[in-house]
Image (tube, helix red, strand yellow):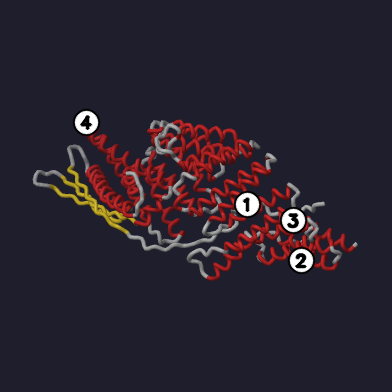
């Protein structure tokens, strides 16, 4: 007869076990670029208009110089970057260090404005941003905004030049003057936030951002119908709370209020609405208001692709993820399918996106109990994974991922009662792990899972052998040594590593011996578990002591059984199972 124990599951405990924080220090280079812009005032134009035009020309000039440098840098580092991405990236990582505007009048009375700006780029940001898809998307939005401001200024100046009378021109100039002044002040605020020292403390940064938010609020009082102000204030509040979350979500809620106002003011501007919906959806996600997040993503999907940064296949992927969270599994599958259909028409295969979509499908199918469909998705995931660049350049990580997919697929076969196929996949997973040059904490999963399968098949000999194979694997593979860890940190790493790997195998092998009535072997394995997990990382020391107590009771050593039951109570005070056991032994 088998006893019911708390057993380590192969997939439940493993993937949130062990995180060693490793730090890489590099000396980043900061490069400066000097941009110059000049503009001569035309009839009816004001100093404010002329200064803005000169500043924009200086920005373009600096951006062009910095772009040449970034392009050269990426080539030196063998980073493959498209031309358009270089421009967007450059605009996103540069910040303004200094700005100087001078005015002179020539012999004909023309007023000439010269703007000079000094911008900087931290080379450390180039690769960081290139490897961050979300950051690149946000920089694309920022760049689009900049281009839109350039175009708006040109259109407004052209409109001014077409004025039919001096009075009409003066009226138009006053309105344009006010708007440019406010936009210029807003741009200064945004540039200062962007350039604010990375070395400042969180408290200093939060205070500075609060001050910046208040400055934008003052601008809103001057021009309450200018949508850019609400949009900018919302972005700053949203970003600020991300960095300094205090548990209240106050700034996120305030950001949504600002996005709501901006939405009304930009009702005819699809490009800006797309940005508002994307950022507001992000806020709803933070607040766990998933139904509203889905509404905004749906609005975003309905905007023509030419008027937004995000392609619909990515939006379907995003909405599919949220449908998963909301347990609307069929809708998640439908969105993944819609995205996959769109991807068929693209000349370049988006492998990572395909993987994300099939992961949505496989999670949804498993939740719906459609294990055959899930198995098909896992096979597709393994096939796609082999086409990624990481599969060749990072073989250890690639084998970890494939091994995990195989274990997940094996679990689906178990659900279908196809144990032979499950064991075949688990064995493939183990073979991949053996091929690696460095072990991973996840390598324990297939050994545990294979043991569970043999336990279901009532084959204790093979169950015990699976756990023994795992113990021998980790004994042979050794323990990796992450870089830049102090001796104390490495000792902690070893302790957590052992608790997450060998300790789990000893514990489950102890149960298998126990179920086979081999009580001495079971006691030995439980004690090995206790030695390897002294700080109770796995939260199972109470069960280990309780199981040892049961073993001693089975071989009629009652006093020792009570001793270990009391140890279980020390780990788990007032545990009714231990209390009832002691009463049984003493009766």
In the rendered picture of this protein, how many numbered marks are placed on residues? 4
**Pointer 2 residue:** 567
At horizontal 41% and vertical 31% (from top left) the residue drawn is: 304
Residue 204 in the image: above or below residue 311? below
Q: Where in the figure is residue 9, as x and y percent of width and height?
A: 67, 52
Q: Are marks 4 and 2 in contact (CB under 8 Å)?
A: no
Q: Residue furthest bottom?
A: 487
**Pointer 4 residue:** 163
Q: Upstream in the sequence, badge 3 or badge 4?
A: 4
Q: Where in the figure is residue 513, as x and y percent of width and height?
A: 76, 58
Locate the C terminus by quadrant.
bottom right
Q: Secondary structure at mark 3?
A: helix
Distance (Cα) linking label 4 and label 2: 91 Å
Q: Upstream in the sequence, badge 1 or badge 3?
A: 1
Residue 496 visible? The answer is: no
Distance (Cα) linking label 2 and label 1: 32 Å
Q: Secondary structure at mark 4?
A: loop
Residue 524 visible? The answer is: yes
Q: Upstream in the sequence, badge 3 or badge 2?
A: 3
């Amino acid at each position: 007869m088998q006893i019911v124990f708390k057993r380590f599951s192969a997939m439940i405990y493993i993937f949130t076990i062990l995180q060693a924080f490793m730090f890489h220090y590099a000396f980043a280079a900061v490069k400066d670029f000097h941009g110059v812009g000049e503009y001569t005032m035309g009839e009816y134009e004001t100093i404010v208009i002329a200064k803005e035009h000169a500043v924009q020309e200086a920005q373009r000039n600096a951006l062009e110089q910095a772009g040449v440098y970034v392009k050269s840098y990426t080539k030196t580092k063998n980073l493959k970057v498209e031309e358009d991405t270089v421009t967007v990236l450059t605009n996103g990582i540069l910040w303004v260090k200094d700005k100087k505007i001078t005015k002179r009048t020539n012999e004909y009375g023309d007023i000439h404005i010269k703007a000079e700006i000094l911008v900087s780029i931290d080379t450390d940001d180039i690769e960081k941003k290139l490897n961050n898809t979300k950051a690149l998307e946000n920089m694309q939005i920022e760049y689009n905004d900049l281009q839109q401001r350039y175009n708006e200024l040109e259109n407004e100046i052209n409109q001014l030049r077409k004025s039919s009378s001096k009075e009409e021109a003066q009226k138009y100039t006053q309105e344009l003057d006010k708007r440019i002044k406010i936009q210029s002040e807003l741009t200064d605020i945004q540039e200062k936030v962007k350039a604010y020292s990375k070395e400042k403390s969180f408290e200093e940064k939060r205070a500075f951002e609060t001050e910046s938010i208040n400055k934008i609020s003052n601008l809103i009082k001057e021009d309450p119908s200018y949508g850019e102000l609400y949009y900018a204030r919302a972005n700053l509040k949203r970003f600020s709370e991300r960095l300094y979350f205090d548990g209240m979500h106050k700034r996120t809620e305030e950001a949504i209020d600002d996005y709501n106002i901006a939405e009304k003011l930009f009702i005819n501007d699809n490009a800006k609405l797309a940005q508002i919906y994307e950022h507001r959806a992000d806020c709803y996600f933070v607040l766990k208001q998933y139904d509203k997040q889905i509404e905004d993503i749906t609005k975003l999907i309905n905007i023509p692709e030419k008027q937004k940064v995000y392609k619909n296949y990515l939006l379907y992927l995003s909405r599919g993820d949220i449908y998963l969270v909301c347990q609307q599994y069929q809708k998640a599958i439908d969105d993944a399918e819609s995205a996959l259909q769109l991807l068929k028409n693209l000349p370049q295969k988006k492998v990572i996106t395909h993987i994300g979509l099939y992961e949505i499908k496989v999670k949804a199918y498993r939740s719906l109990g459609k294990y055959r469909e899930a198995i098909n998705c896992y096979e597709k995931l393994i096939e796609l994974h082999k086409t990624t660049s990481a599969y060749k350049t990072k073989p250890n990580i690639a084998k970890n991922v494939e091994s995990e997919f195989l274990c997940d697929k094996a679990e689906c076969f178990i659900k279908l009662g196809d144990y032979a196929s499950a064991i075949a996949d688990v064995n493939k997973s183990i073979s991949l792990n053996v091929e690696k040059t460095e072990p991973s904490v996840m390598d324990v999963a297939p050994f545990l899972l294979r043991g569970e399968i043999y336990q279901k098949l009532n084959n204790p000999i093979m169950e015990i052998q699976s756990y023994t194979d795992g113990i021998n694997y980790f004994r042979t593979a050794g323990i990796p040594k992450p870089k830049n860890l102090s001796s104390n940190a490495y000792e902690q790493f070893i302790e957590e590593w052992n608790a997450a790997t060998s300790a789990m195998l000893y514990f489950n092998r102890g149960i298998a011996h126990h179920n086979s009535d081999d009580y001495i072997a079971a006691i030995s394995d439980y004690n090995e578990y206790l030695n390897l997990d002294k700080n109770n990382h796995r939260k199972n020391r109470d069960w280990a002591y309780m199981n040892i107590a049961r073993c001693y009771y089975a071989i009629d050593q009652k006093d020792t059984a009570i001793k270990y039951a009391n140890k279980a109570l020390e780990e788990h005070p007032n545990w009714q199972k231990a209390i009832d056991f002691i009463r049984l032994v003493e009766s």
